[in-house]
Image: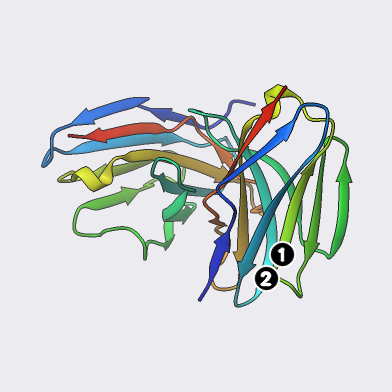
Amino acid sequence: GQGVEQPDNLMSVEGTFARVNCTYSTSGFNGLSWYQQREGHAPVFLSYVVLDGLKDSGHFSTFLSRSNGYSYLLLTELQIKDSASYLCAVRDRGSGTYQRFGTGTKLQVVP
Amino acid sequence: EAGVTQSPRYAVLQEGQAVSFWCDPISGHDTLYWYQQPRDQGPQLLVYFRDEAVIDNSQLPSDRFSAVRPKGTNSTLKIQSAKQGDTATYLCASSRLGSAETLYFGSGTRLTVL
């Protein structure tokens, strides 16, 4: 079947890094987006990847492996305010232009 | 530019009551999406439009839910007879032609059905 999977929770220490994983199955991959969602707020777009490899955007970096159906979002130099849910969303030929979201990973950054 | 605007911000209903949600997308965005997000879950697509046309409503519970975008701008999502299982946040998002990888979300309507 077609799905987007993410771990429920992740905890990391302030000043270090966190890697948020996403695995997906699709009938025809057409790009993957990452969003940040703070408690009680709407998702906010962070990054989009469609080609294999690492895309460095400073505080946020994203990696994609299409052959493995896998992506991760890497947050470096974590701050307490990075505590939020991180959602990945996949577009494929089956979904047209809409994005299928995973359940999200709740990241808690602790001192 | 102004963001996606949704109203109301909150709604509390008894089972069987009706409710409507309103969305004003970013000006110039041709595609509008309605997502349902239950607590602690990811957004799940209900329906989406390109201009005034429905592109996909296969996940919209058609016996009780309806959605329109008559002039290709604002949109209304209506629940005819709410159930407790409809308790969720209803998110509207829009995207620009050729940039469907970037969704801009409104603040959502948090619905509680008692």
Residue A25 shown left or right of residue B17 in the figure? right
Residue, x 36% and y 66% (percent of image)?
A: B58
Residue B24 shown left or right of residue B99 in the figure? left
Residue, x 15% and y 45% (percent of image)?
A: B81
Which quarter of the figure is the C terminus of chain B placed in?
top left
User: Which residue does the numbered mark 2 point to in the structure image?
Assistant: A29
Q: Secondary structure at mark 2?
A: strand
Can residue B52 be seen at all in this image of the molecule?
Answer: no
Q: Secondary structure at mark 1?
A: strand
* Amino acid type of the residue that numbered disc 2 sits on in the rendered structure: Phe
Q: Quadrant of residue B45?
A: bottom left
Q: Quadrant of residue B18?
A: top left
* Amino acid type of the residue that numbered disc 1 sits on in the rendered structure: Tyr
Horizontal and vertical percent position of residue B29: 58, 43
Residue A95 shown left or right of residue A82 in the figure? left
Mark 2, mark 1: which one is toward the viewer?
Answer: 1
Can residue B26 be seen at all in this image of the molecule?
Answer: yes
Way the structure is coloured: rainbow
Q: Is residue B37 above or below residue B6?
A: below
Given residues A7 and B49, the one toward you in this image is A7
Q: Dot 2 falls on which chain?
A: A
User: Which residue does the numbered mark 1 point to in the structure image?
Assistant: A70
Which quarter of the figure is the N terminus of chain B placed in?
top right
Given residues A40 and A12, the one toward you in this image is A12
Alpha carbon distance from label 2 to label 1: 11 Å
Residue, x 24% and y 60% (percent of image)?
A: B62
First in sequence: mark 2 vs mark 1: 2
Q: Dot 1 falls on which chain?
A: A
Q: Are marks 2 and 1 on the same chain?
A: yes
Q: What is the crowding at mark 1: few (fewer than 14 residues within 10 Å), some, or many (at least 20)?
A: some
Q: What is the crowding at mark 2: few (fewer than 14 residues within 10 Å), some, or many (at least 20)?
A: some
Residue, x 76% and y 75% (percent of image)?
A: A67
